[in-house]
Image (spheres, helix red, strand yellow):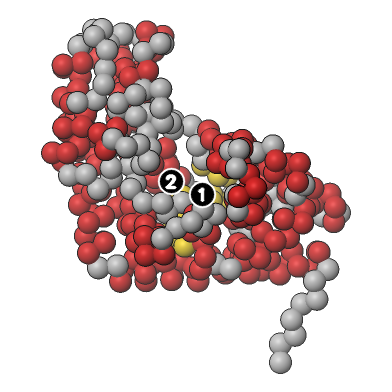
Amino acid sequence: MSESSFTPRVFSGIQPSGNLHLGNYLGALKRFVDWQAKDMETIYCMVDLHAITVWQDPKDLQKSTRELCAGFIAAGLDPEKSILINQSQVPEHAQLAWIFNCVARMGWMQRMTQWKDKAGKNQQNASLGLFAYPALMAADILVYHATHVPVGEDQKQHLELTRDIAIKFNHDYGVDFFPETQPVIEGAATRVMSLRDGSKKMSKSDASDASRINMTDDADTIAKKIRKAKTDPDGLPSEAKGLEERPEARNLVNIYAALMEHSVDQVLADVGGKQFSEFKPMLAELAVEKLAPISTEMSRLMDDHTEIDRILTRGSQRARAITAPILRQTYDIVGMVPPVTV
């Protein structure tokens, strides 16, 4: 089976860890919507199995999963055009992950930067799930024979491991069964930084709520946070090179460019020479225009999660129509005895 014979299919996922913010929207959700408009099948996942690699309060996890699904829909993902799923409702993810645990090598896992960062010096107390996380991520992708995965730069290493697992499986069993999936990393604001410190990534774990724009913030809160965002005293340059060594300025320009769907150079051609006292109101107005409707729709969906639960149930049914045959073929390749219908 050549690469060209795989159905073009996009898969990506986000952990339901609560407090969706602007970085999640520009780095993931907005790009998911863009891919939905292309002539490819798109599958987007709330990866709750990944979330429990560190302890989660059960009630919070349920709420966060539904909130993430609400964010997907409010951002523009259409459950009729894209398949929206909760990872744990599609058991083939975990079943294929076990096979990949037996294909992947310990040395591969130990080299993963995120494993080193998250486990730190306390690796003996980290969960086995956290260590095996990349094999489950590979299964998430390959159980759909996904050909493209929109991800942030921080997940690129995991995508490379996914390709390694696919290549080794194909080699070990003398098949051409799993595709060598392509990571897709693009956009002016795939990495959105803190509004209080341009050297740090925008994060829900930052102690200061002013450091991020939450997707549940109302219009007044969004505008206020942008007005108070940290900047420097210099005016805006007319070309991107002038943003070097100016992390806060670069961050705000990147956010503006991503919301406008323009390049940084296009933005600077228009605003070069302006002071931040002029630029921030422009950014605030644009952010409110783009984000406030999303916040409103998320609130509506979360008021009664019946619609969300129905969408996820239907999504899992559609997903399993893809994953079940692929897992059956994988079992056959590996040598598992198939069940007999009686």
Q: Give the percent coordinates (x, y) of residue 210.
A: 25, 34
For the point 21% across and 44% down, the residue is 217
For the point 17% across and 39% down, the residue is 221
Give the farthest residue toward the left: 220
Q: Which residue is mark 2?
A: 32
Rounded to the nearest angstrom, the CA distance separating label 1 from label 2 is 8 Å
Instruction: Kindly tell me whether residue 1 is visible in this rendering.
Output: no
Instruction: Kindly tell me whether residue 243 is visible in this rendering.
Output: yes
Q: Which residue is mark 1?
A: 12
Q: Give the percent coordinates (x, y) of residue 79.
A: 39, 61
Within-10-Å neighbours for mark 2: few <14, some 14–19, many 20+? many
Mark 1 or mark 2, which is nearer to you?
1
Q: Nearer the viewer, residue 225 or 238?
A: 225
* Tag 1 near tag 2, CB within 8 Å: yes
Residue type beneath disc 1: Ser
Left/right placement of residue 182 relative to residue 297 reads right
Left/right placement of residue 177 relative to residue 200 reads right
For the point 43% across and 46% down, the residue is 32
- Secondary structure, mark 1, is strand
72 above or below 58?
Answer: above
Q: Give the percent coordinates (x, y) of residue 63.
A: 34, 61
